[in-house]
Amino acid sequence: MRRLPCFAVPLAAALFLASCEGDRGPAGPAAPDPAPYVMGSVYYGSYDNSGYGYASISNLGVMPDVTFNGVPSLLSSPVNPPNPLAVLAPDLSFSPGDSVHLDLAFPQPGGQPGNAHAVVVIPDTFHLVYPEPEQNFDLPIGSDFTARWTRSNHAQAYRVRMVLRYVDLDTTLGSLIPAAQTHQVLDTLVADTTVVLSGQRLFPDPAWASAWDQREGEFSVSAHYGPWQPGAPGNVNGDGRGFFFARTIGETIWMDLVSLEPARTTTVQPELSVRR
């Protein structure tokens, strides 16, 4: 069996940052303490009417009081500067169209109280029109993928996510143990209710994709409220800065990735893995 790299191969272009350090000059004046930076989100699951919130907070050496619509959050990572700390509100109650307020209270470097806040609106539920989530869907390797869904009130964009998974099986002695596996991810935001993912982008090397024993895909879409375009200013106000957004989770399409090449002959004909 050929040896293939067992690591994720992102579809989006990766940005590699390199740095080098020369001789140090004289120390300049100390920079002021940066304001707390917040990356917050709330999610509404239309499939079970569930809600939860999450926030990652940087530039803060103490645990702030963080609430979502007045509901206290739980610390989910230790306070360990300069690493950001994370908080979670696992059981929030809201409905589509409701406003959700994020509030942070913390002491500032001078000792005076600080506060940061933001507000979002939960997008309405929506439905995939094509492909239908209930149908069995085959995507030929190398072909484009098209999806359409109904519009969501209060949504300012839609997050689309495609995950392609590949598995090679160890078929010696009749076993079906994964010998190698990898996945590719495309994750982006769009303004329209239709998306076309090109086959060249999904399958830059169709022969490579076709050579795996098992191949499957997962497409999902969520309705998004909050800043999303490149360069958009943050919506966290007060003594902090950052971004806060809301997403209503939509339906998921599971698919088989169908090879256009003749299937390889193996001693055991494995079944495709369970997709739900």
Image (cartoon, rainbow, N blue to C red):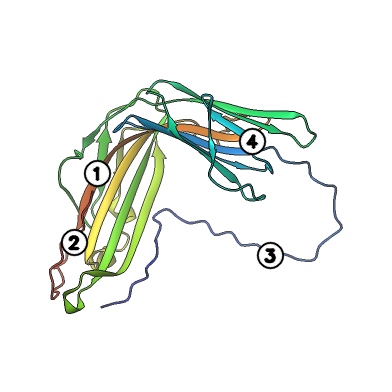
Distance between the Cα atoms at labels 3 and 2?
45 Å
* Residue at 18% from the left image edge and 61% from the top image edge: 259
Within the image, what quadrant is residue 102 found in? top right
Q: Is residue 48 visible?
A: yes
The disc, 1 or 2, on the residue closer to the chain's N-terminal end is: 1
- SS at mark 2? loop
- Read off the residue under disc 1: 253
**Mark 4, mark 1: which one is toward the viewer?**
4
- Read off the residue under disc 3: 20
**Mark 1, mark 3: which one is toward the viewer?**
1
Task: Give the image location of residue 263, x and y in percent.
Answer: 14, 68
Distance between the Cα atoms at labels 1 and 2?
19 Å
Distance between the Cα atoms at labels 2 and 4?
52 Å
Q: Amino acid at mark 2?
A: Ser
The residue closer to the viewer here, 47 or 129, is 47
Pointer 2 local density, CA inside 10 Å: few below 14, some 14–19, many at least 20: some
The residue closer to the viewer here, 151 or 119, is 119
- Read off the residue under disc 2: 259
The disc, 1 or 3, on the residue closer to the chain's N-terminal end is: 3
Distance between the Cα atoms at labels 4 and 1?
39 Å
**Mark 2, mark 4: which one is toward the viewer?**
4
| Residue 64: mark in rendering | 4
Quarter that holds the N terminus: bottom left
Distance between the Cα atoms at labels 1 and 3?
45 Å
* Residue at 28% from the left image edge and 77% from the top image edge: 2
The disc, 3 or 4, on the residue closer to the chain's N-terminal end is: 3
**Mark 3, mark 4: which one is toward the viewer?**
4
